[in-house]
Amino acid sequence: MKGLTLKVVAGLLALTVIANPVLLNAQEKVNKVDVCAQAKSEANADVNSLLWAGVGFFGQLAGVALAYGIQTDPPASRLLGKSPKYVATYIDCYRKAARDVQFKYSIYGCIGCVSLELIIVVITLM
C-alpha cells in the first residue's frame, strides 16, 4: 500500500510539473476594445505634449513629419506576464495612440509658429 501511495503522489507531482507551463502559457481571452482603451490612456499619459509642441513650433513642417514618423514603444514592464495576443494588440494600439498625440501637438506648435510669424508680418507692415 505504501508503495502504491508513493507512486500515485509521484505521478500527481509529475503531472503538475508538466501541466504548469501549459496552464501558464494558456491564451487569455483578449478584449481588443479594453486593451486599446488602456493603451490609449497610457500613451496619452506617457507622451510629452510640450516637447512635441516645441518640435512643431521650431521644426514646422519637418517637425510635424518627424512627429508622425517616430514610433514610440510602451515600457516592457507593462507587458510582462501577458499573452502574445494581448501584447501584440496593446503595442499596436499604443503606437497608434502615441503617434496621434505626437502629431496633434506638433500641429499645434506649427500653427502657433505660423500665427506668430503672421502677427509679426502684420505689425511690421503697419
Image (tube, helix red, strand yellow):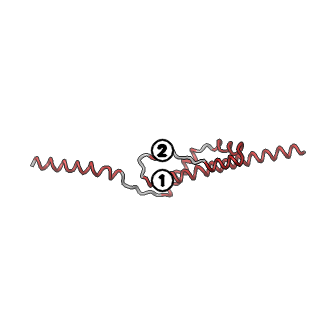
- Percent position (x, y) of residue 23? 33, 52
The reply to whether discs 1 and 2 touch (Cβ–Cβ < 8 Å) is no
Corner quadrant of residue 30: bottom left
Outermost residue on the right side: it is 126
Q: Which mark is residue 88?
A: 1
Q: Is residue 39 left or right of residue 101?
A: left
- Kindly state the secondary structure of the residue where label 2 is placed: helix
Number of numbered discs visible in the structure rendering: 2
The residue that disc 2 covers is 76
Q: Which mark is residue 55?
A: none
Q: Is residue 6 left or right of residue 35?
A: left
Q: CA distance from mark 1 to mark 2?
A: 12 Å
Q: Nearer the viewer, residue 48 or 66?
A: 66
Q: Is residue 91 left or right of residue 47?
A: left
- Percent position (x, y) of residue 59? 70, 44
- Percent position (x, y) of residue 40? 55, 51
- Kindly state the secondary structure of the residue where label 1 is placed: helix
- Percent position (x, y) of residue 65? 66, 49
Mark 2 or mark 1, which is nearer the start of the sequence? 2
Q: Amino acid at mark 1?
A: Ala
Q: Residue at x 39, y 55 (%)?
A: 27
Q: Residues within 10 Å of mark 2 (few under 14, many from 20)?
A: few
Q: Residue at x 87, y 43 (%)?
A: 124
Q: The C terminus is located in which quarter? A: top right
Outermost residue on the left side: it is 1
Q: Is residue 107 left or right of residue 90?
A: right
Q: Nearer the viewer, residue 61 or 78?
A: 61
Q: Amino acid at mark 2?
A: Ala
Q: Residue at x 32, y 50 (%)?
A: 21
Q: Residues within 10 Å of mark 1 (few under 14, many from 20)?
A: few
